[in-house]
Image (tube, grey):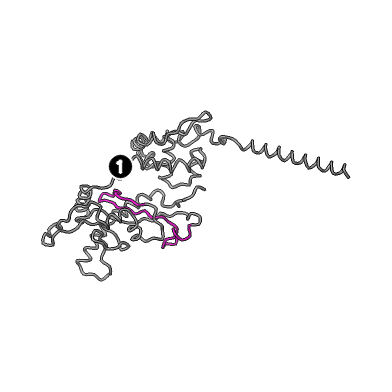
């Protein structure tokens, strides 16, 4: 009986040792620093191969990045130091130019991280890290130059632009909310579920007469109305408390007898009527004066719809993924 037990134990031990050896062999086989397909990034990756050819053609470069070569180089000079990583003893880091290219390609197309990773010959997790890092660097480096808080003089200049281009006086901007369709994050319930039956976050924007974004608020829940998002935003709170530094009231052109009028923002019916926020008159059977007012207001308000529509022109068919798995 003892001999039988000893043979059994020896067999079990041998099987266990074989299993451990197989596990170690598999672990060593998969424990590589860089996958073989990624090692050839400098030979076949899109940045090292296609982009050098695109630089010879301004039109194709513009269509690829939605930026000209000069704009790309200028942006790289601004954010390059923020997105440059040091080389290690084991491998060279991805250059700032390639990191910027990966981020801009994602912003221009809305492609999945997996698709961009394949074309650039980098890991999916690498793209997951690069995009938010570069976007943050772009915002930090450019916000003061291109998205600075408007001053009283800026608001006055914007109002002059609406008067000249859209024949709507004392208007400091057009306000609207844009739903960005996305895949709902896990355990988010109905927070992002909107009235269209999809999941989204909301971009609230104020646009001037030349289609330029002057104020933005990103991240509102899709289920929240435009009026609710405005009320919860920093812009909406400043508008309510009168701390936007709008120009002082002044008479409408050719209507001095009506006295000074406030500077306003124009919006659609989803927003509440406020002293500095104008919306169309409700109803269909309106007197001529109100119909003309609604026409002028809607005409001025189109700038924000056109501006937000232009931003989604390259990726309107894609769905935003607010998660790391792609």
Q: Position of residue 44 (x, y in %)?
A: 50, 34
Residue placed furthest toward the right? 1
Residue shown at 21%/49% (left/top)?
152
- Extreme residue in the bottom direction: 285
Magenta highlight range: 188-217
Is 109 drawn above or below residue 259 in the view shown?
above
Residue situated furthest left in the rendering: 257
Answer above or below: position of 137 versus 233.
above
Q: Is residue 128 left or right of residue 156?
A: right
Q: Please name the residue shown 47% across and 41% down the image.
A: 129
Residue to which mark 1 is pinned: 144
242 part of magenta stretch: no
Neighbours of disc 1 within 10 Å: few (<14), some (14-19), many (20+) = few
Q: Which of the 4 quarters of the picture holds residue 54?
A: top left
* The residue positioned farthest toward the front in the image shown: 2
Residue placed most toward the observer, 61 or 88: 88
Report the front residue among 298 and 95.
Answer: 95
Name the spot of residue 204 as percent of width and height, x first: 34, 54
* Quarter of the image that includes the N terminus: top right
Q: In the rendered view, does 285 fall on the left or right side of 315?
A: left
Secondary structure category for the residue under label 1:
helix
Please check the rendered image and state whether residue 190 is part of the magenta-colored stretch, yes or no. yes
The residue at the point 35 percent across, 37 percent down is: 75
The percent coordinates of residue 221 (x first, y second) are 41, 57
**Count of numbered labels shown in the rendering:** 1
Residue 29 screen position, x and y as percent = 64, 36
């Amino acid at each position: 009986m003892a001999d039988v037990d000893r043979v059994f134990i020896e067999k079990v031990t041998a099987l266990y040792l074989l299993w451990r050896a197989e596990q170690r062999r598999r672990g060593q086989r998969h424990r590589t620093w860089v996958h073989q397909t990624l090692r050839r990034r400098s030979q076949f990756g899109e940045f090292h191969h296609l982009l050098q050819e695109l630089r010879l053609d301004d039109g194709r470069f513009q269509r690829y990045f939605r930026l000209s070569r000069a704009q790309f180089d200028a942006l790289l000079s601004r954010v390059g130091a923020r997105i440059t990583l040091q080389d290690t003893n084991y491998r060279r880091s991805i250059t700032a130019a390639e990191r910027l290219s990966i981020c801009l390609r994602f912003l221009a197309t809305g492609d999945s991280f997996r698709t961009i990773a394949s074309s650039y010959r980098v890991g999916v997790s690498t793209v997951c890290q690069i995009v938010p890092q570069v976007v943050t660097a772009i915002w930090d480096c450019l916000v003061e130059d291109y998205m600075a808080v408007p001053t009283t003089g800026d608001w006055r200049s914007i109002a002059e632009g609406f008067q000249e281009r859209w024949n709507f006086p004392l208007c400091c901007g057009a306000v609207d909310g844009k739903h960005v369709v996305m895949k709902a994050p896990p355990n988010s319930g109905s927070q992002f579920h909107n009235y269209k039956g999809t999941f989204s976050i909301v971009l609230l924007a104020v646009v001037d007469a030349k289609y330029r974004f002057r104020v933005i608020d990103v991240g509102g829940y899709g289920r929240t109305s435009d009026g609710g998002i405005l009320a919860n935003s920093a812009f909406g709170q400043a508008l309510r408390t009168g701390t936007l530094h709008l120009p002082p009231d002044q008479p409408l052109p050719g209507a001095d007898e009506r006295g000074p009028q406030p500077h306003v923002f124009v919006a659609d019916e989803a927003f509440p009527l406020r002293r500095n926020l104008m919306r169309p008159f409700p109803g269909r059977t309106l007197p001529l004066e109100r119909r003309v007012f609604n026409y002028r207001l809607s005409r001025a308000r189109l700038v924000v719809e056109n501006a937000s529509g232009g931003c989604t022109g390259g990726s309107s068919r894609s769905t935003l993924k607010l998660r790391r798995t792609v």
